[in-house]
Image (spheres, grey):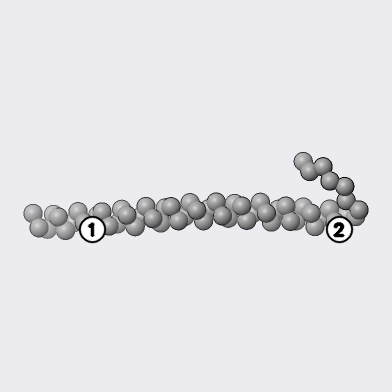
Amino acid sequence: MFNCHFNSSKEKKSFYQHKKLEMLNYIKDSLERKIASITASIEVLEKQISRDKEVEVTN
């Protein structure tokens, strides 16, 4: 996977821990973008439902 030379097992462990952290942060960022998108969709849908209820009352 990674073609690296490590002087010690401690360096190797540290390297893989940092790579894992980068991967987890990437996944977290991706999920946060998805949550923001869903939240915005929910808000728009709630506004549309509210608007449609107002139209029904006035008719």
Residue placed most toward the observer, 14 or 4: 4
Could you say where residue 15 lies in the image, as x and y percent from the top left?
Answer: 79, 54
Residue highlighted by disc 1 = 50
Residue highlighted by disc 2 = 10
Could you say where residue 14 lies in the image, as x and y percent from the top left?
Answer: 80, 57
Q: In this view, does 22 lie to the left or right of 46?
A: right
Q: In which quadrant will I find the N terminus?
A: top right
Spatial separation of the CA atoms under disc 2 and disc 1: 59 Å
Look at the numbered disc 2 and give the secondary structure of its residue.
helix
Q: How crowded is mark 1: few (under 14 residues within 10 Å), some or many (20 or more)?
A: few
Toward which corner of the image does residue 11 lie, by quadrant?
bottom right
Q: Which residue is drawn at 51% across and 56% down?
A: 32
Q: Residue at x 43, y 52 (%)?
A: 37
Amino acid type of the residue tagged 2 in the rendering: Lys
Toward which corner of the image does residue 43 lie, by quadrant?
bottom left
Most extreme residue toward the right is: 7
